[in-house]
Image (cartoon, rainbow, N blue to C red):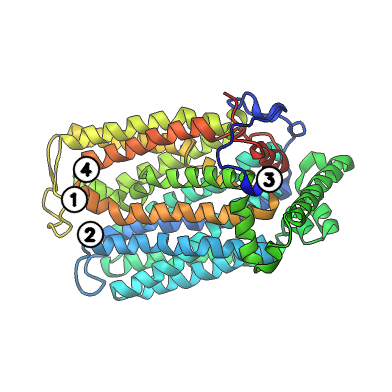
Amino acid sequence: MDDSQEPLISDERREDGFARDNDAPRRKAPSETALGTFVLLLTFAAGISGLLFGYDTGVISATLVSIGPALSGRELSSFDKSIITSATALFALIASPISSILADRLGRRHVILYADALFVAGAVLQAVSSTVAVMVVGRCIIGAGVGAASFVVPLYIAEIAPAAHRGRLVTTNVMLITAGQVVAYVVGWLFATHAPAETGWRWMVGLGAVPAVVQAALIAFMPETPRWLVKADRSDAARRVILQTQGADAGNGEHVDAIIKNVESEVRAEQEARRLRGTRQSKLPSWLAAWEELLSIGQNRRALAIACLLQGLQQLCGFNSLMYFSATIFTLVGFRNPTLASLSVAVTNFIFTGIALVLIDRIGRRRILLYSLPFMVCGLLLASLGFSFLAVDTNPNAPHDAPPVTGSISAASIILISIMLYVASYAIGLGNVPWMQSELFPMAVRSLGSGVSTATNWSANFVIGLTFLPLMDFLTPPWTFALYASICVAGEVLVWLIYPETAGLSLEEATSLLEHGWGVGR
């Protein structure tokens, strides 16, 4: 059976060491050395997009409770709030696969620059909007920028990172996302407290343009990734970048040569595989040929299945509903300062993402997910229990000075604590592991596969953003959180069944795990 006929689920197992003992992280990369300054600077420069990603998802929470009747001369309805939030996810969904094509043709760096332009345009349009429709258009433009950045930045970092440090460097981008959310809540609280109600929210959304301008200026000093350069037949340039990014290992010329040869070998193998599959793809446009390669080869299909599972699970577990609507939730529960309560959630997310930064390459991706998902389930079920003791008025048009709930203060405290437990568990595992998606794909489909799985993330994000408040209205809060808990249980089972460990492997070694099966030793 050739690759084009290979089933998605295969019973074959690798006979080498890759398929065995997948609960333990592998250590086949060169011995761990200190990270070089240059690769750290590149990670933080690229990670400014992550900061913007986090800021734009976090700031909308404070904006929705501060905006009042400033748009279209009326208070926002639940439908208005859902459209404003979900518009970002919808256009991120559209932008991700388009960006993957551009990243292959023009390079990863150019896509980051285009995302910055979209961030600036969207922030300015939101700041000057006077109707719900214009605000939605601004959120759509921001969504396109977020979609491009959320796909390309983890890919850029993964392709420049030394294998032994790849997990923590990609997690650094996730940490910058959470830092952006913290900044958004602090900015939201400051403007909601000290600025005029008519203009405070405009400053909240407009300030998102500043980091994008800074990053656009830094792009000129950022090199392209060595793997894209090799694919573009620029091996000498790739060698120079590797020498700059490999830290102490760069002094070992044999190590650099080995990386170049591995990448070149993968490129040649992929070209030979295309030739052996005949001329069928030559009759197709290049972008359609890439889609056929992604979907017709068993190894690529398995990589896509795992990446889409993790990205979908990251959103369907309901986390971003807390980011988008946390201030609204805490208003419903009865907190006097809901934005400040939301800030505590964002700070928890930031702190535990920092813990993940330390653990991700030591414990491994698979194991950290299997350990953290049960705690997410506990947090969601505890929140469901807390909501069951409260009579929540979810009417968005209720007077702001009216008590939104009846029930005990202890029940509200249970909800806050349970949400923080859930967020901490999410930050350690599911908040960062899905963004390791580029480890799974061979180079020929790495950009497209990462773009499609990122689009899966934003598809699920769109569904969550559009349905969360209606679910709170019609399914009731206890059952809404119980539904998210059941999704996490299903995710735990699927991760255990099909997600192999990739920690410590080079990108080329990691992709080979899925050649003849799922690569999970049982």
- Real-space Cα distance between discs 1 and 2? 9 Å
Q: Name the residue under label 1.
A: 473
Residue 274 placement (x, y as % from top left): 73, 55
Assess disc 2: are there few (<14), some (14-19) or many (≥20) residues with their C-alpha within 10 Å of its C-alpha: some
- Identify the image quadrant of residue 148: bottom right
Would you call the spot at circle 1 few (<14 residues within 10 Å), some (14-19), or many (20 or more)?
Answer: some
Q: Which mark is residue 78?
A: 2
- In this figure, which residue is indicated by the disc labeled 4? 477
Identify the residue under disc 3.
Answer: 2
Tag on residue 458?
none
Q: What separation in Å lies between label 2 and label 3 (alpha carbons)? A: 52 Å
Marks 1,3: beta carbons within 8 A: no
Query: Which residue type carries mark 4?
Result: Pro
Q: Could you say which quadrant of the image residue 424 lies in?
A: top left
Q: Residue at x 49, y 56 (%)?
A: 455
Sequence-earlier tag: 2 or 3: 3
Q: Where is residue 342 drawn, in percent x and y?
A: 33, 46
Whether residues under marks 1 and 2 lie with C-beta atoms below 8 angstroms apart, the answer is yes
Of the image marks 1 and 2, the number of the one nearer the N terminus: 2
User: Tag 1: residue type?
Assistant: Asp
SS at badge 3: loop
Instruction: Name the one closer to the observer, 298 or 146.
Output: 298
Instruction: Kindly identify the residue that appears in the image at 50 percent across and 60 percent down.
Output: 147
Q: SS for tag 1?
A: helix
Work out how far the residue at label 1 is from the one at label 3, CA to CA, in angstroms: 52 Å
Task: Residue at 59%, 51% (x, y): give it.
Answer: 154
**Mark 1, mark 3: which one is toward the viewer?**
3
Q: Which amino acid does label 2 sit on?
A: Ser
Residue depth check, mark 2 versus mark 3: number of the one nearer the observer: 3
Quick check: 229 above or below 419? below
What's the CA distance linking mark 1 and mark 4? 8 Å
